[in-house]
Image (cartoon, rainbow, N blue to C red):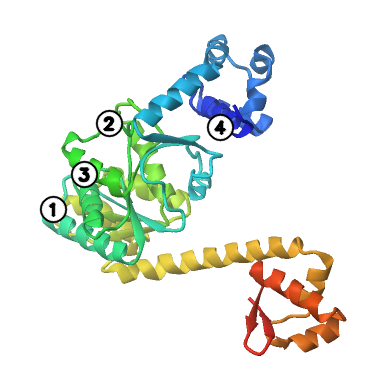
Amino acid sequence: MNNDRDGYLYWIWITTIKGIRKNIIKKLLNYFKTPENIWEQNLEELKFRFKLSDKEISIFEKSKDLTLIEKWIKKLEQKNISYYPINHPNYPDILKNIPNPPLGIYVKGNTIPFKKRYLGIVGTRNCSEYGRRVASKLSKELSSKGIGIISGLAKGIDTVAHKSTLEVDGFTIAVLANGVDICYPKCNMELMKKIEEKGTIISEFPPGTRPIPGFFPLRNRIISGLSQGVIVIEAGEKSGALITADLALEQGKEVFAVPGNIFNKSSIGTNKLIQQGAKLVMNIDDILSEIMDNFYINQYNKELQYKEKIINRLAKEENMVYDCISFEPSHIDILSSKTQYPMNKLQSILTLLELKGLIKQLPGKRFIRS
């Protein structure tokens, strides 16, 4: 096995051990940095240093079998399921930044397009015709703007959001509170198959895991975690959709709410969200005015950080030329005069700076910073 494969296997091992609390795994990773380092530790020392029980040490000992892990990976491949530990390049960066991120995610369907923006759409399972119409309209219009729609595959609003997105060839992600090989509710079996073909199905729970009530709030934090914001359409006073809204706020995400009929119990939660400061939504412009600004600011900051890294790695001669170029066009003759470099050497350096995305060449052999 090559080193990359070995590294992946160790990450698989540490993030899928059953019976060890997640906070212990995180402490071990924070301390030892890599799963391979944890693997190599003496179990008695681990027990003493991290105050592990005899049962936990026994679980660790039995779990250290790379052959079984290889077999487990093959089973996933046979079911067309991918597993991405938190260090894997296909694990979404946005999910790493939430409190208590999943140590790994199971994925069925397409790889998540990282450059796409996402919004979560959630709401009651017992939605009204009004709720269905709103969910359908917003999902389709947002999809037409290139925004992916995330929901939880539940009955009601979730189902409408997924279906409507697929109807306009948009990209949708279904986050499950069970294994990605199980459909819950069963009535969404056909919908789940379509999402697998055209979108992505995600869960932090291993294949074969059945849904239980405690898993749904954990599922909801991933819906909000993958999203730039969450839209709540019809939610009762104790709706699970409100949990998703609370989690979104904790994660620093935008929360949007569609106003509802004051005589409808399914609107109590959404109307209260608006009272508490959620952005009232009447059309997609109310959403885009918030999300697009935040998105472009974040993109701009990322581009600045990228350029700073490139600039810090410039060779001395490249740095000299770059310092002579500003946001006003400079002719190549002026740059030659300032740097005292021969023309052929200067042209070579200018080409390198252009390839690195730091400068642009304008007509007439003039150069400007990007």
Residue carrying label 2:
182
Q: Residues within 10 Å of mark 4 (few under 14, many from 20)?
A: some
Q: Earlier in the sequence, mark 2 or mark 1?
A: 1
Residue carrying label 1:
128
Q: Which label number is shown at residue 186?
A: none
Q: Nearer the viewer, mark 3 or mark 4?
A: 4
Distance from disc 3 to disc 4, alpha carbons, whole Å, reads: 32 Å
Task: Identify which residue, 253 or 280, lies in the foreground.
Answer: 253
- Provide the secondary structure element on which disc 1 rests: loop
Q: Are marks 1 and 3 in contact (CB under 8 Å)?
A: no
Q: Are marks 2 and 1 in contact (CB under 8 Å)?
A: no
Q: Earlier in the sequence, mark 2 or mark 4?
A: 4
- Provide the secondary structure element on which disc 4 rests: helix
Q: Residues within 10 Å of mark 2 (few under 14, many from 20)?
A: some
Q: Which label number is shown at residue 191?
A: 3
Q: Earlier in the sequence, mark 3 or mark 2?
A: 2
Return the x and y of residue 228 as percentages of the image width and height.
42, 57
Q: Which residue is at a point 35% across and 34% down the rendered structure image? A: 80
Q: Can you tell which quarter of the image residue 81 is in?
A: top left
Q: Amino acid at mark 1?
A: Ser
Question: Eyeballing the image, is 155 above or below 228?
Answer: above
Q: Amino acid at mark 4?
A: Tyr
Q: Is residue 170 visible to us here?
A: yes
Return the x and y of residue 157 as percentages of the image width and height.
22, 50
Residue carrying label 4:
8
Horizontal relation, residue 324 to residue 189: left or right: right
